């Protein structure tokens, strides 16, 4: 019940922040009749955007299944899909997207993977997710140079981007460290447990159990990483799927802008979108709410007229975030109900 309340609270906070920031965007862009502007967008545009979002979920699920297969474990595609959308929902209602990975580890463990194997799958998935995002973003200036496209950054956008990149690289560095050197987690856990304040709060027997679990998980994680390295085809396919995921995600705003009458080149929208996602990665609010809306408006403000900007930010957020919350939340609810009913039946028998 407490977990349910935390999830519900996170969802309400994220929706409140998102809605409040959208109202501010509408105010500053002088968007007077949002619904009329939204209804003016063709059904085909909205449907295609939703298809791209669903396709990104399918690709993400495929990557999860490929990495599990690299561990020598088989999970059904439907189960991988459910884990993916549930993880996206939990990431969307927790600060820094921190709720997604633990949920994926839990459900992968329920599918027969060890805790270490589940952690390895999720960590490698996150590593490929982050590196492919950075790789595509770095590749953008090269493409723009070759095509002659230009994007002038105002001082505010430039400073925001600089801070976002620094924070992103810091956390990516930590992720790389844990992936290459799994024992790093054990070293950190041991250091924390040896602190005087920590030892006063938790009995030594409990500390020993925690450290033992960390050691076992680190060992299983190391073995999992080695299995993936030994099966290069799986690692290559997972990398390709990571790039495909981002190409699908980036295509959503392109089609939305086409539906709103904008003729911005694909590469220009691609570059700005990747920049927005790079900065959004470590916005500390649930699902990057508030920061996502403000960042989208800020980075696209120099490219779009005010009458288009507000509606575009609204549609982009609805299609990519609100729909994810609705679908992922529904799957989480159904899985929870199914688990509860199964537990009741087992207790009766």
Image (cartoon, grey):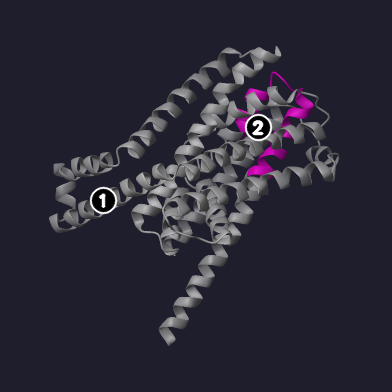
| 1 or 2: tag closer to the N-terminus | 2
Q: Is residue 26 left or right of residue 43?
A: left
Q: How many marks?
A: 2
Q: Residue 214 has which mark?
A: 1
Secondary structure of the residue carrying tag 1 is: helix
Q: Is residue 123 left or right of residue 148?
A: left
Residue 29 in percent (x, y) is at 73, 26
**Whether residue 29 is situated above or below residue 244 in the rendered picture:** above
**Which stretch appears magenta?**
293-320
Residue 301 occupies quadrant = top right
Is 185 inside the magenta-drawn segment? no
**Whether residue 158 is situated above or below residue 16 in the rendered picture:** above
- From the image, give the main secondary structure of the stretch colored magenta: helix
Residue 127 occupies quadrant = top left
Which residue shows up at 30% across the image and 37% down it? 181
Per the model, the C-alpha gap separating discs 1 and 2 is 45 Å
Is 300 inside the magenta-drawn segment? yes
The foreground one among 223 and 3 is: 223
Q: Counting other residues with Cα less than 10 Å from the Cα at mark 1, is it few (<14), some (14-19), or many (20 or more)?
A: some
Which residue shows up at 55% across the image and 16% down it? 158
Q: Residue 24 has which mark?
A: 2
**Whether residue 269 is situated above or below residue 201 in the rendered picture:** above
Which residue shows up at 24% across the image and 40% down it? 188
- Indicate which label's residue lies in the foreground, 1 or 2: 1
Q: Residue 149 has which mark?
A: none
Q: Is residue 97 visible?
A: no
Secondary structure of the residue carrying tag 2 is: helix
The foreground one among 115 and 298 is: 115
Residue 65 in percent (x, y) is at 52, 53
């Amino acid at each position: 019940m407490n977990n349910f309340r935390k999830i519900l609270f996170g969802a309400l906070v994220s929706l409140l922040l998102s809605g409040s920031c959208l109202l501010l965007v509408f105010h500053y862009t002088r968007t007077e009749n949002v619904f009329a502007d939204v209804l003016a967008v063709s059904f085909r545009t909205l449907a295609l955007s939703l298809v791209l979002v669903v396709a990104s979920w399918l690709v993400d699920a495929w990557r999860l299944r490929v990495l599990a297969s690299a561990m020598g474990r088989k999970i059904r595609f439907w189960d991988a899909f459910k884990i993916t959308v549930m993880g996206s929902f939990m990431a969307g209602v927790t600060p820094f997207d921190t709720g997604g990975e633990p949920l994926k580890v839990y459900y992968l463990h329920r599918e027969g993977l060890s805790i270490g194997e589940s952690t390895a799958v999720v960590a490698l998935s996150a590593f490929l997710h982050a590196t492919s995002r950075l790789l595509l973003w770095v590749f953008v200036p090269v493409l723009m140079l070759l095509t002659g496209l230009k994007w002038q950054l105002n001082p505010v956008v430039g400073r925001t981007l600089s801070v976002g990149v620094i924070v992103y690289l810091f956390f990516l560095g930590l992720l790389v460290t844990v992936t290459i050197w799994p024992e790093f987690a054990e070293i950190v856990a041991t250091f924390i447990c040896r602190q005087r304040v920590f030892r006063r709060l938790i009995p030594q027997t409990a500390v020993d159990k925690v450290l033992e679990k960390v050691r076992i998980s680190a060992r299983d994680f190391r073995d999992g990483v080695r299995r993936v390295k030994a099966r290069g085809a799986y690692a290559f396919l997972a990398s390709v799927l990571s790039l495909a995921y981002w190409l699908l995600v980036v295509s959503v705003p392109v089609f939305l802008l086409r539906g709103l009458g904008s003729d911005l080149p694909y590469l220009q929208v691609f570059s700005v979108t990747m920049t927005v996602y790079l900065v959004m990665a470590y916005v500390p609010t649930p699902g990057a709410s508030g920061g996502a809306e403000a960042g989208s408006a800020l980075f696209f403000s120099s490219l779009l007229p005010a009458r288009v900007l507000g509606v575009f930010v609204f549609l982009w957020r609805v299609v990519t975030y609100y729909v994810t919350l609705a679908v992922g939340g529904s799957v989480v609810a159904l899985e929870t109900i199914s688990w509860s009913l199964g537990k009741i039946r087992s207790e009766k028998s």
